Amino acid sequence: MSFAFFRKLVAPKMLVSFLMGFACGLPLLLSGQVLQAWMHDEGVNLKVIGLYALVGLPYTCKFLWAPVFDRFIPPFLGRRRGWLLIAQILLALSLAGLGQCDPAAMPWMVALMAALVTFFSASQDIVVDAYRREDLKDEELGAGSSLYISGYRLGMLLAGGGGLMLADLLPFSQVYLVMAVLMAANAVVTLLCQEPPMDQGRPQNFRESIVEPFCDYFRQDRALLILLFILLYKLGDQMATAITTPFYLDLGFTKTEVGAVVKLFGTWAVILGGLAGAAVMLRIGTIKGLWLFGFLQMASIPGFFVLAFIGHSVSALAAVIAFENLTGGMGTAAYTAYMASLTNKRFTATQYALLTSIMGVPRVIIAAPSGWLANTMGWPGFFLFCTALAVPGLLLLPIVAPLKRQGN
């Protein structure tokens, strides 16, 4: 690796992408798994805990208020940094407020505060995605997206694994205060980074803010096929991993083994995949990365099929998890970089929020019948079916991302 190449990988812009990814990953599990653990400890009914999954809805419909971040400019720091600072401060305050609630005595107040956390977290995601698209050149998007995902996973690991371990030493109320302070500290990055140029201007009225971003997107060639591709590219991978915990337990793995190998070891494999993806896409570009990593992530799914026959083997589990998470991290990096390249910089926040909302559909809706399918087909048949589900997205690659496409 040449010095010039290494310098590109550790450039300030790339560091900002990594740190902003960390800021976006940090709050995700604090309104999910960590909150569920707290409510369980407080004796909250399991049915009520299940309903709290609805507080995550802002992540899937964030395109509804994204136009605000394109249209209006705060009176400080500029369009992107100004909104980002506001979102981060309000997010930190919401986390602190959530920590002061009593899940047993005030379940609806907990729900309200958790909903505020997800709303401001989704708002931060919108602005960070727009910032990254506008701050990086097209040829830097692949590497920047890879580092963003690595930072995101690290933030999730710190909040999820670190938060639960911290809860063994401190009350959950104090855990949330610690996480709120960490969230607020991310504002330092916002204050120190540069505001991206507004080369394309910004929307000036209601039509330009709400209607034009969608009209602009659908004016491009193959717009519907691109949306279909975004829906399908990671479908097989997402469905296969949607229900893996019962699969591991059925094979005889203990919860400790699953936690150590899948959660901790697997998360670091994703982070490594993001870093490797950054290096590769700096060399070959986003489009070639989309092809290469797409086939690799499909090739990782049969590993679960093989594991179903091997049975209880920690080394085999580690190998399958390492390969799947490594290639999954690479595929996600190329996927997000590709989506960013599709946006018009005048409407970056709105268009990118729309695309990422579609990206989340398989994870939230299409993967829902995975348990029924696994029960009907058996684990080996289910994972072969998931491998087949990865094929349609790859078949669309020559149409939506031809290798001859220039500038990528």
Image (spheres, rainbow, N blue to C red):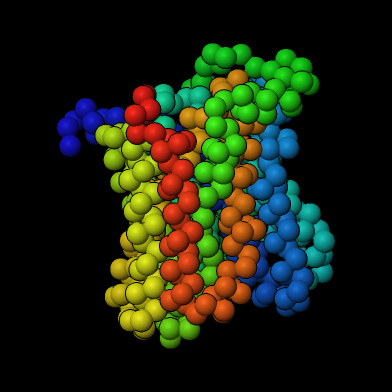
Q: Nearer the viewer, residue 326 or 5?
A: 326
Q: Where in the figure is residue 253, as x and y percent of width and height? A: 42, 82
Determine the image quadrant of residue 380: bottom left
Q: Is residue 75 above or below residue 29?
A: above
Quadrant of the rendered image containing residue 106: bottom right
Nearer to us in this view, 357 or 265? 357
The number of callouts visible is 0
Decide if residue 42 is on the left or right side of residue 316.
right
Up-down: is 276 above or below 78?
below
Quadrant location of the C terminus in the rendered image = top left
From the viewer's perspective, is residue 71 above or below residue 284?
above
Which of 305 and 22 lies nearest the eye of the viewer? 305
Q: Residue at x 69, y 58 (%)?
A: 99
Drawn side of residue 268 relative to residue 386, left or right: left
- If the image is split into quadrants, where does the N terminus sit? top left
Q: Position of 375 compared to 18: left or right? A: right
The answer to whether residue 121 is seen in the rendering is no
Image x and y of residue 391, in percent: 44, 54
Residue 366 is at least partly visible in this image? yes
